[in-house]
């Protein structure tokens, strides 16, 4: 699993393939053809690529209107602007109105590290997770990205898909099928559970290898669906391992860790540690430098797991 | 308060702009990142403002009576930082850290890290509303201080600008000057091919603004316009500065792909040569 990929490539390839078979599929962008990697889509389907210009609120509203007209719009732009700028359109025009809009947030987390906090999308999961009727999905690798895009096109209703740019390896096998609200166990273990999404999953897996060398068998779950959460998998992890570390490329307030903590606190209380950005605007720096700063590395996760086990004992 | 270089001549401003462009190219090359097209597009505007128009003082960047310069097109942080260094707000050596890990010089400006920055921009369409607020605050204080806000042309596709433009017209904010960097290009294509803005002057005029179109690389023309503000008493001022994205470097000029491309070592050499 050494080769790494930009998930936007799987996104654009899959979308072009789907659009070839289904003319209802359209793309809506905000001067984001390049950053969404939709150049090939635009070439193949110039009439079905609707570029509204730098206008995210309009973009989401237009998406809802296109859905009303029977189209399947994939509304795609840089995650911080799509979610932050158009939040009320997402709530009212997409989720509340229950329109068949596929929101695709590109280059989320700290992918645009050097560009500074305006361009870091580390609040998007919290913002969107609070909205009813809006599945929130973070594909972990190109295989899952393709599976989620296909699932979204085939499933009526709103969805938000967070599509990563920081290169990741495939952790799923070809032929993987995505099911909404289902976590996958990538490594079994009964001493502690590490639950992660997106870029943090490969780091969690590597941390588990470190931990095994120290005699600690960690269970590693990939949790692509932040909402609706796989409550059963969370409760099982709590009951069977007794301690949970969550890891996400997001603030620790209100994202994946928050969602899991809500379930753990109410259904199976066990000690937890939430890893992510600790409630600050991150400094400027490359994504990998920022991961290191916040301990979002295999070593950082392993250390957190050991500390949690010690505290829980 | 002291006025900064208000006496700079057009020739001196041109010299500053040349130096700013050179340094700007260097720091983008060093960072391996940046928005070179939009930086070079605005260099003459920033040099004119900072060396001949704005009442600002690098020794007292927080002076409550300073003129406000708000750069809404925050992606052009390279030209803002190099200008702030040239004007003495930050040390020139700080420019060498542009976008490096932990640097104060984020890819988009942060007022809590960089003296002279009024507000944190980066998401497009934020500067004009803030500028309307600073202009209203000056009116409430019966202060002569002015607000100059620089917006990209593609940026004007954001609806928030038009809410602000409407409010400024309604309130007759004649202490507010919006400068449009009208280079005709946005991130991925021409503005007019994406979501057309023209007739832009008529749009501002319809919202109650006094509008002039000038050559945004002609320092005399910029000076004449900025010294004539407000163009009309009781109306906000709009200067549509006709510019060329990437101005000054032949292979970057008016090329959409240079929105955020980084020059190679040879290209950097050629660019610096052309800017000498
Ligand atoms: C709200 C928002 N949407 C999208 C972007 C991404 N973006 C950065 S610069 C840019 C193009 C800006 O074009 P323009 O305003 O014409 O600036 P210039 O040509 O002077 O570089 C875009 C789309 C952004 N920064 N903010
Ligand atoms: Mg432009």
Image (spheres, coloured by chain):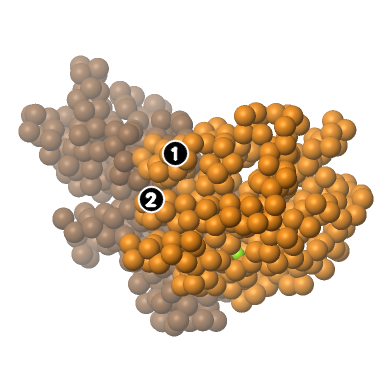
Chain colours: A brown, B orange
Q: Nearer the viewer, residue A155 or B106?
A: B106
The residue depicted at 57 percent of the width and 37 percent of the height is B88
Image quarter of residue A16: bottom left
Element class at badge 2: helix
- Real-space CA distance between mark 2 and mark 1, rounded to the nearest whole angstrom: 12 Å
Q: Position of residue A158 (x, y in %)?
A: 52, 58
Which residue does the image show at 34% across and 24% down from the upper left? A269
> The residue marked by circle 1 belongs to what chain?
B
Q: Secondary structure at mark 1?
A: helix
Q: Is A312 left or right of B130, judged from the image as shown? A: left
Residue A100 seen by the camera? no
Q: Which mark is residue B31?
A: 2
Q: Quadrant of residue A273?
A: top left
Can you say whether B272 is above or below A199 in the image?
below
- Could you say which is closer to the camera, residue A284 or residue B18? B18
Q: Nearer the viewer, residue A267 or A167?
A: A167
Q: Which mark is residue B94?
A: 1
Q: Residue at x 53, y 66 (%)?
A: B248
Residue at the spot 41% in from the left edge and 81% down from the top edge: A20
Same chain? Circles 2 and 1: yes
Q: Position of residue A125 (x, y in %)?
A: 46, 44
């Amino acid at each position: 699993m050494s080769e790494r990929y930009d998930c936007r490539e799987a996104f654009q390839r899959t979308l072009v393939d789907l659009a070839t078979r289904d003319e209802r599929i359209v793309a809506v962008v905000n001067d984001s053809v390049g950053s969404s990697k939709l150049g090939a889509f635009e070439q193949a389907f110039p009439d079905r690529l609707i570029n509204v210009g730098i206008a995210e609120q309009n973009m989401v509203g237009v998406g809802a209107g296109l859905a009303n007209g029977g189209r399947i719009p994939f509304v795609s732009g840089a995650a911080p602007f799509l979610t932050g700028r158009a939040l009320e359109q997402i709530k009212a025009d997409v989720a509340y109105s229950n329109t068949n809009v596929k929101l695709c947030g590109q280059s989320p987390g700290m992918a645009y590290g050097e560009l500074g906090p305006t361009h870091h999308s580390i609040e998007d999961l919290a913002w969107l997770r609070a909205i009813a009727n809006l599945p929130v999905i973070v594909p972990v690798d190109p295989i899952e990205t393709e599976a989620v895009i296909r699932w979204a096109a085939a499933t009526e209703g709103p969805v938000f898909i967070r599509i990563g740019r920081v290169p990741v390896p495939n952790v799923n096998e070809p032929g993987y099928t995505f099911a909404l609200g289902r976590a996958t166990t990538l490594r079994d273990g009964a001493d502690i559970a590490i639950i992660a999404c997106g870029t943090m999953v490969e780091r969690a897996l590597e941390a588990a290898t470190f931990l095994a060398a120290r005699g600690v068998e960690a269970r590693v779950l990939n949790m692509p669906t932040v909402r609706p959460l796989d409550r059963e998998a969370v409760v099982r992890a709590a009951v069977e391992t007794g301690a949970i570390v969550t890891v996400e490329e997001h603030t620790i307030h209100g994202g994946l860790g928050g969602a899991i903590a809500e379930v753990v606190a109410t259904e199976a209380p066990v000690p937890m540690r939430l890893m992510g950005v600790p409630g600050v605007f991150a400094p400027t720096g490359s994504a990998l430098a920022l991961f290191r700063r916040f301990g979002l590395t295999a070593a950082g996760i392993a250390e957190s797991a050991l500390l949690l086990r010690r505290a829980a004992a | 308060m002291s006025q900064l270089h208000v006496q700079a001549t057009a020739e001196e401003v041109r010299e500053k702009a040349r130096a700013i462009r050179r340094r700007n190219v260097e720091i983008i090359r060093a960072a391996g990142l940046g928005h070179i097209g939009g930086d070079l597009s605005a260099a003459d505007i920033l040099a004119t403002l900072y060396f001949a128009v704005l009442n600002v003082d690098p020794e007292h960047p927080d002076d409550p009576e300073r003129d406000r310069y708000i750069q809404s097109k925050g992606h052009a942080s390279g030209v803002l930082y190099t200008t702030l260094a040239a004007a003495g707000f930050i040390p020139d050596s700080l420019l060498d850290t542009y976008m490096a890990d932990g640097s104060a010089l984020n890819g988009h400006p942060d007022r809590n890290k960089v003296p002279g920055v009024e507000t944190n921009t980066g998401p497009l369409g934020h500067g004009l509303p803030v500028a309307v607020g600073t202009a209203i605050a000056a009116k409430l204080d019966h202060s002569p201080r002015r607000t100059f806000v620089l917006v990209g042309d593609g940026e004007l596709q954001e609806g928030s600008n038009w809410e602000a433009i409407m409010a400024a017209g309604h309130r007759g904010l004649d202490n507010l000057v919006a400068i449009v960097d009208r280079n005709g290009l946005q991130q991925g294509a021409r503005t007019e091919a994406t979501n057309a803005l023209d007739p832009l002057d008529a749009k501002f005029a319809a919202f109650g603004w006094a509008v002039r179109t000038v050559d945004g690389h002609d320092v005399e023309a910029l000076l004449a316009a900025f010294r004539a503000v407000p163009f009309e008493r009781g109306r906000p001022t709009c200067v549509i500065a006709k510019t060329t994205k990437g101005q000054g470097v032949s292979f970057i000029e008016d090329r959409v792909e240079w929105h955020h491309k980084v020059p190679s070592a040879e290209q950097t050499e050629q660019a610096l040569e052309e800017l000498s």
